[in-house]
C-alpha cells in the first residue's frame, strides 16, 4: 500500500470489524430462528480472541499482491518503507523475477565456475553531501561493503559511477574521491572500474554516486531473512539512528544542536569475526533506510514468524533519542550506516554478543528481542511502560535523502 490510499493496517482493522458485525448479525438472526444452520455456524466461528483475529487479518492484508495506486513516483517510493517495497515488488521484481533476485536480500549470490559470489549495487543521493563524520564518498564505499558483508561475503571489488552537476566544485569532488580511497583501503577493497556523467546545471544535486560490489562467499551458511526460527535471538551491533539524525541536523533546517556524528563505517571485519565464532547466524541486515523496524518486519514476513522486541533493550544514544523526540519520530525507524541487525540461534546469543563486542564497532551490541511462532508476520514491541504495540512498516521515511 502507499500514501494515497488507506494503509493496510486500517484496511485489516476495518475488515475485522465488518466481519465481526456480520457474525453478530447472523448470530442474532439465528437466535430468532431466522438463520438456522447458518446462525449456528456463525456462532461457532465467532472469534474468542479479537486481538488474534486482527493480527491474522493484518497478516493476510500484508501478503496481498502488491499494487501501485499512484500515477507518478513520489518521494515515499524511495524512502525504504511500504511504498518502496510496493514499487520494488510490483514493478521491478514482477518484471525481472528470477531465483537470484526473488529473495530480495542485500546481495545476490550467483555461482560462477564453482565459486559462490555476492553481487550488490546501490546509489547514493544524500543531502547534504558533507556531514559530521563523513561525506557521500565514504558513505558510498561503506554502504556497498556492508551490503556484501551482511550477505556473508568477503568484499573484494567495487565500481564507482558519478553523476556530476555542471558547476560542481572540483575541490569538493577531490575531497569526496579521497574519502572513497581511504574508506576502500580501510575495508580492504579496491575500486576497479567506473563511469562519469555530467548533467546540466539544476538537473542534479551536485553529485550522485553509484557503487556496485563483488565479493566471494567462503562458507556453507545459507543466510537470509527467511531462515529465522522461533527461539532465535535478535541482536543489534550498537546504538541505532546516529546517521539519520546527524543528516537531519546537518541540513540546518531545525534549531537543534547535538554533539553527534554519523556512524558510517565498513562492518566487514566485525561480521567476519561473528561468522567465525558463531555457526548459528541465520540472517544479517545493515540498518539503513527504514531503520531497525523495517528489517524486523522483513524478517517476520519472509520467515513467517513473529518478532518480539524489548524497547528498554534497544541501544539509542541520548542525543539521538532527544532529537527524535523533538522531531516526533521513533529511533527504530531512523537509519544507521554502521550498524546491523543479526538473527542468531538463541542458544548462541552470548557467543554472538562476545564476538561482536570484541570489535570496536560492536562494543555496545545488545540482544533486543527474540523470534516467536506466535503472530506470524508481525513485529511486537514491549514498551517501557509495560504495554505492547505493533511495529509496522512506515509508508515513507520521516528523514528523506539520508543515503
Image (cartoon, helix red, strand yellow):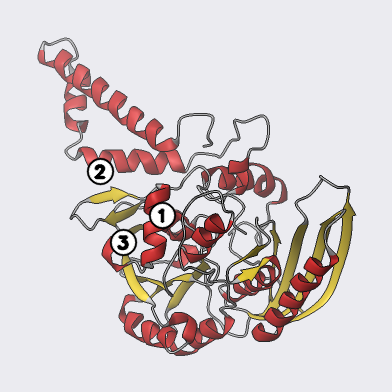
Q: Nearer the viewer, residue 175 or 192?
A: 175
- Residue 52's disc is 2
Are the two marked residues, 2 and 3, in contact with CB atoms closer than 8 angstroms? no
- Spatial distance from mark 2 to mark 3, Cα to Cα? 18 Å
Lower position in the chain sequence, tag 3 or tag 1: 3
Q: Position of residue 227 (x, y in %)?
A: 46, 67
SS at mark 3? strand
Q: What's the CA distance linking mark 1 and mark 2? A: 31 Å
Of label 1 and label 2, which has the lower sequence position? 2
Which of the pair 359/121 is nearer the observer? 359
Q: Which mark is residue 155?
A: none
Q: Quadrant of residue 311?
A: bottom left
Q: Residue at x 41, y 85 (%)?
A: 357
Position of residue 25 in the picture relative to residue 229 (left or right) = left
Residue 210 % position (x, y) = 75, 62
What secondary structure is found at the residue carrying circle 1?
Answer: helix
Does residue 138 lie above or below 86 as drawn?
Answer: below
Q: How far from the left and from the top, in percent, is residue 369?
A: 31, 66
Q: Position of residue 267 (x, y in %)?
A: 56, 78
Q: CA distance from mark 3 to mark 1?
A: 19 Å
**Residue under pointer 1:** 324
Residue where numbered disc 3 is placed = 309
The residue at the point 20 percent across, 35 percent down is 47
Amino acid at each position: 500500500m502507499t500514501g494515497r490510499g488507506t494503509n493496510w493496517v486500517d484496511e485489516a482493522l476495518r475488515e475485522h470489524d465488518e466481519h465481526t458485525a456480520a457474525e453478530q448479525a447472523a448470530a442474532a438472526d439465528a437466535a430468532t430462528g431466522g438463520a438456522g444452520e447458518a446462525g449456528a455456524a456463525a456462532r461457532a466461528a465467532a472469534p474468542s480472541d479479537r486481538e488474534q483475529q486482527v493480527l491474522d487479518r493484518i497478516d493476510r492484508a500484508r501478503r496481498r499482491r502488491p499494487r501501485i495506486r499512484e500515477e507518478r513516483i513520489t518521494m515515499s517510493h524511495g524512502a525504504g518503507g511500504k511504498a518502496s517495497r510496493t514499487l520494488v515488488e510490483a514493478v521491478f521484481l514482477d518484471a525481472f523475477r528470477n531465483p537470484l533476485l526473488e529473495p530480495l536480500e542485500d546481495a545476490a549470490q550467483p555461482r560462477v565456475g564453482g565459486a559462490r559470489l555476492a553481487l550488490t549495487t546501490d546509489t547514493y543521493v544524500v543531502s547534504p553531501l558533507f556531514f559530521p563524520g563523513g561525506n557521500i564518498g565514504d558513505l558510498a564505499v561503506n554502504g556497498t561493503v556492508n551490503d556484501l558483508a551482511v550477505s556473508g561475503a568477503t568484499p573484494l571489488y567495487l565500481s564507482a559511477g558519478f553523476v556530476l552537476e555542471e558547476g560542481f566544485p572540483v575541490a569538493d569532488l577531490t575531497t569526496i574521491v579521497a574519502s572513497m580511497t581511504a574508506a576502500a583501503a580501510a575495508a580492504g577493497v579496491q575500486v576497479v572500474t567506473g563511469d562519469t556523467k555530467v548533467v546540466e546545471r539544476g538537473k542534479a544535486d551536485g553529485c550522485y554516486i553509484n557503487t556496485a560490489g563483488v565479493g566471494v562467499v567462503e562458507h556453507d551458511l545459507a543466510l537470509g531473512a527467511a531462515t529465522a526460527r522461533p527461539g532465535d535471538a535478535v541482536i543489534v551491533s550498537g546504538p541505532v539512528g546516529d546517521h539519520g539524525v546527524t543528516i537531519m541536523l546537518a541540513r540546518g533546517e531545525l534549531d537543534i544542536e547535538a554533539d553527534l556524528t554519523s556512524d558510517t563505517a565498513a562492518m566487514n571485519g566485525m561480521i567476519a569475526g561473528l561468522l567465525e565464532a558463531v555457526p548459528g547466524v541465520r540472517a544479517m541486515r545493515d540498518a539503513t533506510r527504514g531503520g531497525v523496524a523495517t528489517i524486523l518486519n522483513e524478517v517476520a514476513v519472509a520467515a513467517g514468524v513473529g518478532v518480539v522486541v524489548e524497547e528498554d533493550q534497544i541501544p539509542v544514544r541520548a542525543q539521538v533519542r532527544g532529537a527524535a523526540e523533538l522531531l516526533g519520530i521513533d529511533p527504530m525507524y531512523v537509519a544507521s550506516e554502521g550498524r546491523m541487525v543479526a538473527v542468531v540461534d538463541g542458544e548462541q546469543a552470548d557467543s554472538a554478543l562476545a564476538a561482536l563486542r570484541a570489535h570496536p564497532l560492536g562494543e555496545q551490541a545488545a540482544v533486543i528481542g527474540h523470534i516467536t511462532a506466535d503472530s506470524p508476520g508481525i513485529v511486537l514491541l514491549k514498551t517501557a511502560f509495560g504495554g505492547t504495540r505493533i511495529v509496522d512498516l512506515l509508508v515513507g521515511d520521516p528523514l528523506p535523502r539520508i543515503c
